[in-house]
Amino acid sequence: MQLLDGKATAESIRVELAEQVKIRKQEGKKIPHLAAILVGNDGGSLTYVNAKVKACDQIGFESTLIRYDDSVSEEVLLAKVKALNEDKSIDGFIVQLPLPKHIDEMKVTQAISPLKDVDGFHPVNLGNMVLNLPGFLPATPAGIIELIKRNGIDTSGKHCVVIGRSNIVGMPVSIMLARNTNPGNCTVTLTHSKTKNLKEICQSADIIIAAIGRPGFVTAEMVKEGAVIIDVGTTRVNDSSRARGWRLCGDVDFENVSKKASFITPVPGGVGPMTIASLMINTLRAMELKGK
Ligand code: GUN
């Protein structure tokens, strides 16, 4: 079994991006600037957004964090999105999801300019992804693909089973891996809560991507010997042995599945850091696309 070390891979990407920033600075060019909007105080979202800001600092990007209380109105949020669309100093921005129930996430996502949508969630960018046209790829799927690529895993002709059909992970990653690209050219089965015979389907998978947010859902009996396992789950579970009282738990029973897998991502330190690395890649591209 080989560990797919997202932390180390993301660190190499950060070093590459920092080098590009250094060169841009020497040439007197603009430095990429990412803004992030965070609504509320959800612990997980706060951790992710802080990690995104920290990655900007490490690479040398500028960053701006905009925070609102849970009670912020949709109108105020949409006005901020409009302002960021028009702000020439901001190259790309994200609105951390999920948003409170009274705010329509789709409306907010669609209000972001596709040219600044570095999360790749806007319908224009998702459409470009489907057609394999230039655009911003969603950060988590792009991070998974980059991790597969940089670890030399061959995907062509392989059966990939994706568990979970969310708009931000399961749906886009299944399309990206089915495209005629490298990595890609997989035969993809996209499974979800209504799927029958999930265990049998998983047993025939060369690659499993688990993205349902159910700790330990993928067990050893569901996995074929030598399969590649990508775990997108990051659920906080109570753990009194930790000072903070919780730990992050993936969708895969790592201890037992790792004994059968050829490659497997840990949680934490697998897909999470790669998501942030992809966001940084998209932010640099957003600036370059503007011809700056
Ligand atoms: N919530 C969970 N993952 C993501 C992500 O990649 N981007 C945003 N904006 N929100 C998320």
Image (spheres, rainbow, N blue to C red):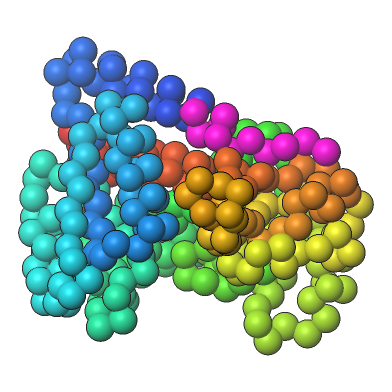
Residues in magenta?
1-11
Quarter placement of the C terminus = top left
Q: Position of residue 198 (x, y in %)?
A: 79, 76
Q: Is residue 5 magenta?
A: yes
Relative horizontal placement of residue 264, taking residue 24 as reference (left or right):
right
Quarter placement of the N terminus = top right
Q: Nearer the viewer, residue 26 or 219?
A: 219
Q: Nearer the viewer, residue 70 or 283?
A: 70
The number of callouts visible is 0
| Rendered view: 11 above or below 185 | above
Q: Nearer the viewer, residue 5 or 117?
A: 5
Q: Position of residue 170 (x, y in %)?
A: 57, 66
Q: Is residue 102 visible?
A: yes
Quadrant in which residue 64 is drawn: top left
The residue that appears at 51% across and 26% down in the rendered structure is 12
The residue that appears at 28% across and 17% down in the rendered structure is 22
Q: Is residue 160 visible?
A: no
| Rendered view: 65 above or below 111 | above
| Rendered view: 112 above or below 51 | below
Q: Position of residue 101 (x, y in %)?
A: 31, 81
Quadrant in which residue 208 is drawn: bottom right
Q: Is residue 28 magenta?
A: no
Q: Position of residue 235 (x, y in %)?
A: 55, 61
Quadrant in which residue 4 is drawn: top right
The residue that appears at 14% across and 18% down in the rendered structure is 28
The residue that appears at 38% across and 50% down in the rendered structure is 47
Relative horizontal placement of residue 132, taking residue 69 as reference (left or right):
right
Relative horizontal placement of residue 68, taking residue 220 as reference (left or right):
left
